[in-house]
Amino acid sequence: MKVIDHLQRAKGTLLSFEILPPLKGKDIRSIYEGIDPLMDFKPSFINVTYHREEVVYQDMGQGLLRKIRLRKRPGTVGICAMIKAKYEVDTVPHLICGGFSREDTEDALIELNFLGIDNVLALRGDAIKSEPAFIPERDGHAHAEDLIRQISSLNKGKYLHDEEQEAAPTDLCIGAACYPEKHAEALNLSTDIAYLKRKVDAGAQYLVTQMFFDNARFFRFVELCRAEGIQVPIIPGLKPLTTLKHIAFIPKTFSIDLPDAFARELMKCTTDAQVKKVGVEWSIQQARELKAAGVPCLHFYTMGKSEAVRAIASQVF
Ligand SMILES: Cc1cc2nc3c(=O)[nH]c(=O)nc-3n(C[C@H](O)[C@H](O)[C@H](O)COP(=O)(O)OP(=O)(O)OC[C@H]3O[C@@H](n4cnc5c(N)ncnc54)[C@H](O)[C@@H]3O)c2cc1C
């Protein structure tokens, strides 16, 4: 079933979450361990991230380094198919522009269609770590908007080349990303929202936010989107901070601010256990307020660890 149908039929706030494919070589059981504890809360859909290849240097000895491209977390589509079969829960594979030509994208969409997957989250993806800015693939898309347009065309039966006679249309529900504190590269929040409107006009049927820790920013963002004419559902994304490492990398990596009251409590923490207590409590308050405000769904970023999300969900749902 499509995400948009889940949202339209919902009688209250839904729960969904995002998982990452395991690191290459790790067992699929780590995925079950991430999903099983959250099944009690009847997730409406589960997102599976897509990870582009990275450039790494292999030491060949004698001072020689070999440059190789390595995809550290393959398996997005396979995991989606597994979740549908094993848990009978709808899935949302993420699809990015980076590393994909338009042909590759079309092939990937055909594969999702054949697997009976009804949803896709259309993203640009970040720049490769060794490159200063995002570089699209030759004949690939530079922005999520263009990817969304390609998916929308395929939904109308328009394939890249004309030779497909009486081509069968796909029927994928398209989601897109949005940023209540603006995307890192955007000039400001209003230009970012203007581009967001273009993604919706191109065919995005709902939006999922980047993680945020200040609900006031989310509510303001939704107001600004509505004022811009963006009418699709906007799903807030929440991430409980649970380790000292999270405090060090999350604000920088995701270009987000921590509100004063939260930051002050975190600064007192000296162990992971203390961070987890403060982080989970903060997320519970955030989730309760968002639910009371009638958000369509609460989407949790698990980053492979579901214990904290379970603790939050058990207090909120
Ligand atoms: C919910 C969510 C899930 C994610 N999942 C993944 C994942 O699985 N894999 C992964 O690699 N990354 C993922 N990301 C990260 C995402 O790929 C990065 O944030 C990326 O830098 C931007 O992606 P986007 O789809 O928002 O890009 P875009 O919408 O293309 O926007 C990127 C930047 O370009 C600007 N812009 C947008 N359209 C145009 C235009 N037409 N012309 C000029 N400028 C424009 C925007 O203002 C923004 O600054 C996710 C992010 C979120 C919020």
Image (cartoon, rainbow, N blue to C red):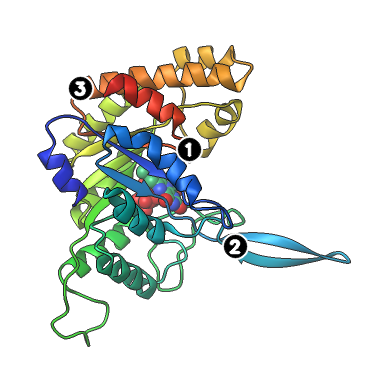
At x 20% / y 22%, what residue is drawn?
293
User: Foreground residue, 226 or 302?
Assistant: 302
- Determine the CA span between mark 2 and mark 3: 43 Å
- Judging by the rendered image, the residue that carries numbered circle 2 is 70
The quarter of the picture where the C terminus appears is top left
Residue 254 image label: 1
Q: Disc 2, disc 1: CB below 8 Å?
A: no
Residue 301: quarter of image:
top left
Which secondary structure, mark 3? Answer: loop
Residue hosting label 3: 293
Instruction: Measure the C-alpha gap from mark 2 to mark 1.
Output: 23 Å
Compared to 265, does 1 lie above or below? below
The location of residue 300, given as percent across then percent down, is 37, 35
Q: Nearer the viewer, mark 1 or mark 3?
A: 3
Amino acid at pointer 2: Leu
Q: Which mark is residue 149?
A: none
